[in-house]
Image: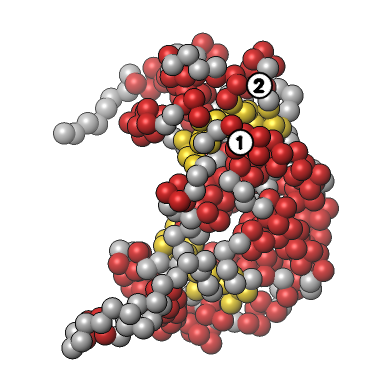
Amino acid sequence: MKVNFTDILTSSVSEHGISQEEILSSEKTLEKVKKSINEKRDKLYFPLNLPTLMESETKEIKEYAASIRDSFDNLVVVGMGGSILGNELLHFALKGTHANLENEKKVYFIDNIDPETNLTLLENLNLKKTFFNIITKSGSTSETLLNMLLIKDLMEKKNINFEKQVLFTTDPNKGFLRKLSQELNVKAYPVHPDVGGRYSVLSHVGLFSAAFENIDIEKLLEGAKERDKHFQENKVLDESSLVFPLVQHKFFKEHKVNINVLFSYSDGLEYMGKWYEQLLAESIGKKFSISNEVVHSGITPVVARGPYHQHSTLQLFMEGPYDKLIIFLVPNSFKKDYQIHEEFKNEPAVTFLENNTYSKLLLSEYTATKMALTEYKRPNISIEIKEINEEEIGNLIYFFEVSVIALGELFNINPIDQPSVEVGKRITHALMGDKNYFDVLADIKKKEEKDKFLLS
């Protein structure tokens, strides 16, 4: 993996960039950040230990996944947010957007509660040949439990034993799902109490579904461990996972750049962007600093895919406000490619495409977009990988996790918690009639009595 910072420098984008001297003068700051991260690894930043800790679990995960693969044709992963985004990232990046068309064993995801979407999927699967992985760390995520109840109901109507076709992934000791696993005698993988959902992809949460479709989870962990080794052994100014958040923080503080666009030139890597979207937003968007000061920190992530978004949002990136940092994510080669030999003589619109590969146009468009943004003085960073494989994806996952934690250190906020997410959950439970949230319901009724401003 190579990270190119050239086009964020003042030498490339003039006053809209930062100087190389500013970065080089931040060595002591980054040394403090690195030291703080290492001091907090065993508790607050516990997820950084997963690549090493999960090594001893891979044999059992692979064997269990193989036994499920032998008995079932489909795996459906059910979760919300961090409990499923990592699984989708691994599937789409490493197997491809249309993997279910060419693979004998299919993997599907239920990551929301739209009844039309979920019923369409479940009513068209052979439920007798479908296994389900229900994932919720707390064991009480309402959307996940609703989907579980739907699945259970549909299976029972077909006289299928739900308990024999499900795996729970949840807290090791508490929560409704853990309790239910004991009552129904359902196998349950643990989610360590110190591992939040958005940092859980390299745990049982993400590794089981990956193993089911023969993704090499050992190589995935090796890639992450290689990045950790890189982080530990490199000088801070040579470590991209530290320089990257430093740059993000400087642009936010000094240039009011509060939008980061992860612009991937690969359909599969778009899901890396979707995973990073939650990682960045939920980790850095905080009202209070560690010292309890009101700071309202936050960088808004935007997910883009090239060349698709060249034809929709690039115009804004090129000529709109100078409030964006563009981060390209690009593989240098693809597992599949095609050379065009079709001839349309005397047709200038297509002759230049003849005898060229499909990927050459894709990568040329990446280079052209990067050059055009730089010409318009729009700061951009490139993260390039040799190819999309397990080692590179594991390395990238760990790179982004370390960089977000380091960014939290620079903002002096906690990048692990998500206190305000719970507010909406409490209101939802109250609206659904949960007696445990009676006090919240009373507050809602008071607010409903206020004057309304409605238009049609």
* Label 2 CA crowd tier, 10 Å (few <14, some 14–19, many 20+): some
- Which of the image's four quarters has the C terminus? top left
Instruction: State which quarter of the image contains the N terminus.
Output: bottom right
Residue sitting at the far top: 435
Residue 157 image point, x, y percent: 43, 14
Name the residue beneath numbered marker 2.
186
* Identity of the residue drawn at 50% across and 85% down: 12
By what rule are the colours in the image chosen?
secondary structure
**Where residue 160 sits in the image (x, y, percent)?**
50, 17
Residue under the point 71% across and 32% down: 190
Instruction: State whether residue 28 is above or below residue 190.
Output: below
Amino acid at circle 1: Asp
Q: Circle 1 sits in a helix, a strand or a loop, which is it?
A: helix
Q: Is residue 58 shown to the viewer in this render?
A: yes
Q: Toward the viewer: 42 or 333?
A: 333
Residue 87's place in the image compared with 237, above or below, is: above
**Helix, strand, or loop for circle 2?**
loop
Residue 349 located left or right of residue 328 = left
Q: Residue furthest left?
A: 456
Reply above or below: 237 against 172: below
Asked if residue 419 lies left or right of residue 360, the reply is right
Judging depth in this view, the residue of 23 and 226 nearest the camera is 226
Label of residue 70 in the image: 1
